[in-house]
Image (spheres, helix red, strand yellow):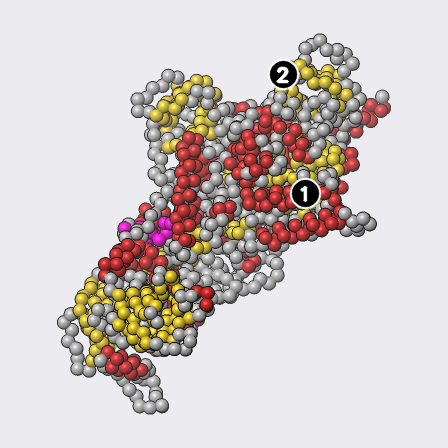
Amino acid sequence: MKLIKLITIITVCVAIGNAQQTPADKQSKSIAIIGATAHIGNGEIIKNSLVSFDKGVILNISKYTGNEDLSKMEVINAFEQHIYPGFIVPNSTLGLIEIDAVRATDDEEEVGTWNPHIRSLIAYNAESKVVESMRPNGVLMAQITPRGGRISGTSSVVQLDAWNWEDAVVKEDDGIHLNWPSTLSRGRRSMEEDRGLKSNPKYKSQTAEIETYFKQSKANSKSNEGSQNLPLNAMNGLFDNSKSLFIHVNDEKGIIDAVEFSKKQGITKTVIVGGYETYKLAAYLKENKVAVLLQRVHSMPSNDDHDYDLPFKMAKILVDEGVIVALETSGDMERMNSRNLPFYAGTTVAYGLSKEQALQLITLNTAKILGIDARYGSLEVGKSATLFVSKGDALDMRTNHLINAFIDGRKISLETHQTELWKRYSKKYSHQ
Amino acid sequence: MLKKLLSISVFFIALSLSAQDYFPKNDGVKTKNTNFTAFINAEIFITPTNRVENGTLLIQEGRIIQVGINVKLPINTVVIDLEGKSIYPSFIDIYSDFGIVKPKRKSTSGRSTQYAASREGFYWNDHVRPEQNAIDEFKYNNKAAKSLLEAGFGVVNTHIQDGIVRGTGVLIALDSKGSDSQRILSGQSAQYISFSRSVLSQQSYPSSIMGSMALLRQLNHDADWYEKGNVTTKDRSIEAFNQHKNKVQIFEAGSRANALRADAVGDAFGVQYVILGGGDEYERINDIINTQAMFILPLNFPKAYNVEDSFLTNSLELEAMKEWNQRPGNPMALDLSGVSFAFTTKGLKSMKDFKINLLKAINYGLDKVTALEALTTEPAKILGNQKLGNLNVDSYANFLITSGDIFAAETTLYENWVNGSRTIITPLSKTDIRGDYRFTINKDTYKLKISGTLSKLKSEVTSDSLKLSSSLNYQNDWMHLMFSMKDTTSQQFIRLNAKILSTIESIKGKATLVDGSTPSVELRKVVDTTKTSKTTKKKESSPPIVVPVSYPNGAYGFSKLPQSETILFKNATVWTNELEGILEATDVLVKNGQISKIGKGLKSKKALIVDATGKHLTSGIVDEHSHIAAASINEGGQNSSAEVSIEDVIDADDVDIYRNLAGGVTSIQILHGSANPIGGRSAIIKLKWGAPAKELIYNQSPKFIKFALGENVKQSNWGGYIRFPQTRMGVEQLYIDYFTRAKAYDTKQKSGKPYRKDVEMEVLAQILNKERFISCHSYIQSEINMLMKVADKFNFNINTFTHILEGYKVADKMKAHGVGASTFSDWWAYKYEVNDAIPYNASILNAMGIVTAINSDDAEMSRRLNQEAAKAVKYGGTSEQDAWKMVTLNPAKLLHIDHRVGSIKVGKDADLVLWSEHPLSIYAKAEKTLIEGVTYFDIERDKKMRTAIQSERNYLIEMMLKEKNKGMKTQPIKKKDKQLLHCDSMNFNQL
C-alpha cells in the first residue's frame, strides 16, 4: 500500500516536473497488433494485418484472419489504424544542442579542420527535451552527426528512448562526414567585398588538400607498428569498408568531383548529403551506386529562376531513376523541426511519389544508407520491433496521431515536456 | 600655313595665363591679351539642336564673342581654319568627385555600438553633413583632368560623396593651364543627398533605407522649426541645410526603387530632387515619369557574363542576364517617355568605357541630339547655368574640335578648349593614314591595313594571305612599322620607317632587314571605295536584339499583366469560413474583382468556367507576420524606431511574392523586425505580383506598428551591452517613458500651440488615440502580462501578440484584455525564451475564445501555411474549420481587413485559392490563386513560364557567348546576395 502511494507520488513528480520521460523497460510479454494497415517500409502494405513481436523482435507479420492463437499475447486492437516502421532522421544534431542561442548547450562543432576522430556519440544527450519531442510524431531513430570543419567527425546511429548514450547506440561510429568545398564562394564583408556568390578561387587547392589528407590516411592505415595519430587512425574504417563516407555537397560539379574522388580512393560506401543538384545527376549516381541523403524538402529554391517546387520534387526525380534516397533535415532549426520528417516525406507525395515510396525515404532507404537495414527500417520478421501505431496516415499532419510506439519492442512514452505543459494549462483553464 | 597658325596660337595660350589684374607682378611687366581667336569653316553645334555649316566661332578672354555664318573678324584675330572639322560644346559631368579625396572609413574602436553623435554643435546624427562644402576639400587633380579632357569633358560639378546630407558641390572648369581662380565657376553649386551613411562615423542610426528616409523627413521638420526661431541652441548642420535650401538638390538614388523613395521624401516637403538613377529606370517607366524629376544617368552598363562554364552559369539568374541585355536601352526608353536626363561618368571603372557605352546607348536607339543634350544643355539646365553647355554669345568658350560626328566610333577628338584655354588631344595637323596599302620588299608583296582611331592605330600586315604579327607607331609625322618575316619560325622582324607628308597616296620610306640592308620602300594606297562603304554600312545596320521587359523583370515576371476576369468555379468544395461552413458541390461566381454569387447551378455566359470537381475552394491565406517583399526589415539603430515605415521599402520584385502565391497566400503584413522595443510601422499588402510597389498596399490600410519584447530587444544574443534596455525590467520603463512623452506631445499638439513636429511621437500618439494598432513580438508570459498592463495604464489595447509562444500560460488574461494571438505552429528551442513553447499553444488560445492566427515569419514556411494550420488539428485537436480560419479569417480580423478578405462571402474581394485536395492536407497543392479576380498564380501557366525562362536563358547565354567570341570583355559570374529576412535580420550592408 505504502509502495503504491510512493509510486503515485513519484509518477506525479515526474509528470509535473521538468525531467524527461522515463525510458521504457524491456519487452516482457509478446505483443500482437491486429487489424491495422501495415506499411512495411519496402513499398508494400498489408491491410488488416497482424504484427506480433517478442523480446524486441518481430515474430510474424501477415494478414489477420481472426483464427490466430493470440491468447498468450497482449493484443492491441488497431482496426482502421496504421502501423509504420519507426522513422529515422539521418545527418542530425539531435542531442548535441539543446537551445540554439545558449552557447553553453552547444556541442555541435569542434575547432579544427580535420576532425575524423571527433565522435558525436559521447556528447549525445539522451535526456534532451528536444529528442523526446520526436517520438510522438513517429521519429524513433537518428544518426547523430557533428558539424563544421572539412571533416566534421564521426557519426553514430541511436534510438531515441534511452537512459544514456551507451544505452541509445544502435550503430557506433557508422561514418565519416566530409564537407566538400563549394565551387561558389562569397566575398568577405570585412574586406568590403561584394557579398554575392562567385566562383570559389580556392576550390582547386581545397580539393587538393582533401586528396592529400586521404592519401596520408591510407598510408597510415597500413602502418605496421600502429600509429599514434588519432585523426588518421579514425579514417581507417573508410578503407576496410567498416565506415561509410558521407560527403556533404550541393552543386553539380562538386558532386561529380566528390564521387570521382571517392572512387579513386577505393571507398565503396559513398553517400551524398544535401545534394541540391543531385536531381541533375540521377543516372550518374545510380550508375556509381551512390546513395543520397537529400536536403530538407521544406526549403527554398536556391535561385530565383528555379521552379518554386524544386525542393519538393527532387526526391521523385531521383527515385524514378533508381537512386537510393533518404530524407535529411539539416538547416535552420533542424533539431526541433526533425519531428516534421514524416511531413517532408508527405510533401514528396504531393509532388509525384506514391505514399509507400515516400515512406521508404524515411525508413528502409535510410536504414540501408546507414547500414542498419538488417535490423531496422522495415516491418519484417526477424527485424527489430521498432514501430508505431498511428490513428491515420502518418505522413499527413492532419492524421499523424500516435497511439503506441515501440523501440526494440519496448513500449515507449509518447508524453513530452510539451504535452505536460499542454495538460497542465488545459487543466488550469478547465477549472476556471 | 597651318603650322604657322599653330605656333601662334600656342603663344597666345601662354599669354592667356596671366593672373587677375589686381595681383602684383614682380617677375616682369603686366600683360593682358585682348586678341580674338576665330575658328572658321567648321560645322558648329551652337546647341545640340542648332547646327551651322561653314561657320565661324569667335572667342576672346575665355568667352564666346560671336558665332554663326556671317561673323566679322576684328583685325586683331588669330584665325584657325577647321575645314571639314566640327565644333561641339564640351561635356559637363554634374555628378563627380573630381579632386576630392575619398573619405576614409573611421576604424571602429571597441566592440560596442555607437549610439550618440561624435560631433558637437551639429545635428544629432553624424550622417547628416550639410555643412560640408566640397570647395574646402577640393584640390585640382591634373591626372584625372587629363582623362576627362580626353573624353570630351570641360566642366565637372564635384562633391564629397559621403553621408546622407553631403553639403554643396563645386563647379570646376577643367582648365589645366589656369589656376583655381579661373577654374572655380561656382563655389556652392548644389546640395547633394543620399540614403547612404557617412563612413566618417560609426553612429548606428540609421541602419536601413527606411531609417535614412525617416531621418531625412525629421531633418526637414527640424530645419523648419529651427528656421522659425524656436531653437535656442546652435546647430551648424541645420543652419547650413537651410542656407542651401534654394539650391538644386541632387539625390543619389542609384536604382529605380530608390529613385521613387527619394522622390517620395522630396514630395512631402515640396522639394523636387534631381535624381541620380541606377540604369534600371526603364523597368517601371511610368513610375519614373510620375516623379517629374530630372535624372542623372551613369553609363556603366553591365558587361556580358563569362558563361563558358555551364555549371557556374547555372547560378546566374535571368534577371542579371536581362540587365546586361536591356540596360543600354535605358537612356532611349527615358527619352521616348519624355524624361529628361544628363549623363555622368560616375560608376565607370575606366574612362575608356565612357565613349564605348555612350555609343552603345546610341546603337540601342538613343537619339544623337538627346545624347548631346544629356552631356551639355541638360546638365547646364540642372545647374541653372546658361553659359555652359552651349556656344551662344557670351557663354564660356568650352568646346571640342572633332574630325566629324562626335558619336561615331572612328571620329577623332582633336582639341578640347576650356575657358578659352586649349588642350590638344590629337594634333590637328596629323595626317590621317588609315587605309589599305600595298608594298614590295625584295620581290615579296605585302598588304598593310591601318585602322582604329587616330590616337590609337591598329595595323595588319599580310603576305600571300599569311597574317604576320605587326605593330605600328605613328608620332610626330613619322610612321614606324614592325612586322614578322614570312618564315614564321625564324622569329625575325622587318622594320619600316617613313616620314608622313600631307598626302598619303604614296608613302616613301626605308625598310631595315635582318641582314642590315635598308632598301627603299613605297607604300601605295589601295583605293577601294565600294568595300569600305560596305563595311561601315554593315557596322551601323546591326541594331541589338533586346529581350522584352517583364513585370517584374526577372524570372516568372509577366510580359503583360494579368487582368481581372469573370470566373465561375463549378462544383467545388467551398470553405466559406462563414456560418454556412463547408459547402459541397457548390459554385462560386467571381465578377468585378469580388465574390458575386455562391450557390448551386450558377450560370454566367461571360464567365470563364473552371471545373472544380473534387477540388477545394477557399479564401486566400493571410499571413499576419511576414518579412518577404521588403528591402529592409529592421531599423535597429535606436531602441525606438516608430518613425520608420515598411511601406517605404516594399520590394515588389521579390520572387518570394510569386512563391507565396504558389502556396495560396494573398495578403500579408510585412512587419518591422524585433531589434528594438518600439519597432517600425507595418505594410499590409496584397501579393499582386507584377504590380508596382505602391499598388500592393491596401487602400485605406489599417495602421499598424511592430513592438517587440524579450531577448531580441535586450540584445541578448548578439552581444550589445550598452543600449537601454538590457532587461525586461528596462523594457517596461522604456514603454512608460515613450508613452508618457507621446501623451504630452499629443496634448500640446491638440492645444493649438506651436510644437516641434516629431514623427516618432506622432506615431506613438496615434496608438494612444486608438488610430494605430500594435502587433507585439512576444514569448514569455511575464512580459506579455506587463505590456497589457502598460496599455491599460494608457487606456488603449494591444491588438495582437505575435509569436506569443507562452500565450497559453496567460490565455485568461489575454482574453480579458481583448488581445488577439498570432503564433507559430511548432517552432521552439531556438532560444532560451522559447523553451516552454508548445505546439498546443494555438489550440489552447483558440479554445479560450481568443482570435488566433498562425503566422510564418519565414519565406519558406509562408508558402505552406495551410500545413501549419493543420498542425493545430494534430496538436490539441482544433476542428478543421477553426484550424483553417487560423490562416485566413482570423489573421484578417487581427489586421482589420476582414471586411474585405478572409472568407468566401458575397461582396468580399475575390481573393481565392483553388486546391487540388483538402487544403489542410500535406498532399494539397494550390492550383490557382486569385486576388480581386485576377489569377496571379496558375499551376498550368507556371509550367509554361518555366519553359519560357529556360529558353530566354538559353537565348541570352548564346548572345553572351557570341559577345565573348567577338573578343568583348566579360565579367565573371556572380549571384546576388539574397538573404531571407527574419525578425532579427539586420541589414547594415545594404547602406
Q: Which span of residues is magenta-colored?
A: B325-336
Q: Chain of mark 2?
A: A
Q: Quadrant of the N terminus of chain B?
A: bottom left
Judging by the rendered image, the residue that carries numbered circle 2 is A47
**Can you give x and y, in whole percent of width and height, for residue A90 in the image?**
66, 36
Question: What's the residue at 39%, 69% (across, down)?
Answer: B483
Residue type pointed to by label 2: Lys
Q: Residue at x 39, y 52 (%)?
A: B963
Q: On the picture, is B533 further left or further right than B652?
A: left
Residue B531 can be seen in this image: yes
| Membership of B334 in magenta stretch | yes
* Residue B258 appears in the picture as rendered: no
Which SS class for mark 1?
loop
Residue A112 higher or lower than A239, as above or below: below
- Residue B66, numbered circle: none
Q: Which residue is mark 1?
A: A266
Circles 2 and 1 in contact, beta carbons < 8 Å = no
